[in-house]
Amino acid sequence: HTLGPYAWYVRVPDLPGFLLHVAPVLNQRLEISLLAGHSGEIKISFYRSGLRLAFEDGRLAEVEPWQPMPEDAGDVGDAGFADLTFLQLLFGYRSMEELDYAFADCWASGTKGRPLIDVLFPQCHSHIWPVF
């Protein structure tokens, strides 16, 4: 019996650790994209907290907590996600385009954030195995 798409309620207590755990998949996605060999960083804002992902020669080298500083035209990052919307992107349930359309406070800058976000976190189907 096949079920249609379903939104699972998933939380990740350690996002930096989880992203490092799935780094081989993220590296593979980057490797087969137009951004292969990318070096640099992307800052993802959750408005009160955030993450900084650093890439070296097309590999995810570091993930660390980061604090956005919007006051005085400070650093607001390269992408922003309110509440738990980033998890919908992370687990492939929604694309960045869908989140951008549905949530006014989800965004990614066109120069650096959007291309990397689209490559690293494409929308994809999940296959869930039940645990009995």
Image (tube, helix red, strand yellow):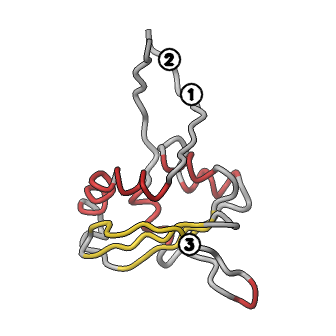
Q: Secondary structure at mark 1?
A: loop
Spatial CA distance of label 1 from label 2 is 8 Å
Q: Nearer the viewer, residue 128 or 132?
A: 132
Q: Which residue is mark 3?
A: 66
Where residue 28 sits in the image (x, y, percent)? Answer: 25, 56
Spatial CA distance of label 3 from label 1 is 31 Å
User: Considering only vertical position in the picture, is 31 above or below 41?
Assistant: above
Q: Where is residue 67, by image quadrant?
A: bottom right
Identify which amino acid the numbered label 1 is placed on: Tyr
Where residue 50 sits in the image (x, y, percent)? Answer: 59, 67
Q: Where is residue 94, by image quadrant?
A: top right
Q: Which residue is mark 2?
A: 3
CB atoms at circles 1 and 2 under 8 Å apart? yes
Q: Residue at x 64, y 76 (%)?
A: 68
Identify which amino acid the numbered label 2 is placed on: Leu
Q: Secondary structure at mark 3?
A: loop
Q: Which residue is mark 1?
A: 6
Q: Residues within 10 Å of mark 3 (few under 14, many from 20)?
A: some
Q: Residue at x 44, y 8 (%)?
A: 1
* Relative side of 62 to 100, left or right: left
Closer mark to the observer between disc 3 and disc 1: 3
Where residue 9 sits in the image (x, y, percent)? Answer: 60, 34
Where residue 111 sits in the image (x, y, percent)? Answer: 49, 78
Q: Residues within 10 Å of mark 1 (few under 14, many from 20)?
A: few
CB atoms at circles 3 and 1 under 8 Å apart? no
Furthest residue to the top?
A: 1
User: Considering only vertical position in the picture, is 29 above or below 68?
Assistant: above
Spatial CA distance of label 3 from label 2 is 38 Å
**In the picture, which quadrant includes the C terminus?**
top left
